[in-house]
Amino acid sequence: SSAPNSATAEPVVSVDPEFASRDFVDLAFTWNATGCAVDTLGDVWCWGNNTAGELGVAALTPRATAARVDIPGTVVEVVGGLAHFCARTSEGPTYCWGYNANGQLGNDSTMSNHVPQEVAGGHAFSSIRSLYTAVVGLTDSTIWSWGNGAITPTEVLTGATRIRAGIDFVYWQDLGGVWRAWGNGTRPVILGVSRGVAPGERLEMIGLPTGT
């Protein structure tokens, strides 16, 4: 029998030349198998599934190659949730797009949208993090949250310096360097806390050194 043709055995991958020429500084994924990356010029590129507009393009079809998302300003951070993305710009505004049944786009609506929507309230966040169907943002020392029924940013607490988030919980570092948390009480929270954390309950994280 003849040997396999090695020239045709390899899969052919198409890559946008402009995308291939960029260097990237941030990367995020949804739980729905979509990825977005921020390049050094502040542009966002997305690829993968597109069931709710999370690629930031009009056609609700998946893409194997990255497409640039039209976002005003220079993006410095991108985060992803169930099927939505949010991008923070250096100019101040944050924009979200994709699935929005829970208000996670933060634009006073529950309508999904492939066009990046400016988050309401005019907040200039210094950091954003995404949960499954919600987003949190930090301004100065105040944490704001939208999604899970809140369709615009709602103040949660003050006195925070850093934020982190998982599928249904948030960690925040207070002004004294102590990490605290709130989240879904049906799941144990890691990092030394042996019990669930009820929504809105905050507690000292056990065993976390200051500045971690």
Image (tube, rainbow, N blue to C red):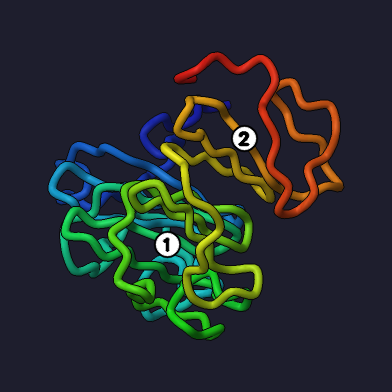
Residue 35 visible here: no
> Whole-percent x and y of residue 168?
69, 50
Instruction: Say which amino acid is labelled 1.
Output: Arg
Is 164 or 35 nearer to us in this picture? 164
- Residue at image point 59% right, 53% down: 131
> Whole-percent x and y of residue 65?
35, 55
CB within 8 Å, label 2 to label 1: no
Q: Is residue 192 above or below residue 44?
A: above
Q: Is residue 128 left or right of residue 166?
A: left
> Which disc, if any, is residue 200?
none
Give the SS element for disc 2.
strand
Instruction: Say which amino acid is labelled 2.
Output: Arg
> Which disc, if any, is residue 63?
1
The span from disc 2 to disc 1 (Cα, nearest Å) is: 39 Å
What is the quadrant of residue 133 in the picture?
A: bottom right
- In which quadrant of the rendered image does the N terminus lie? top right
Q: Is residue 127 left or right of residue 180?
A: left
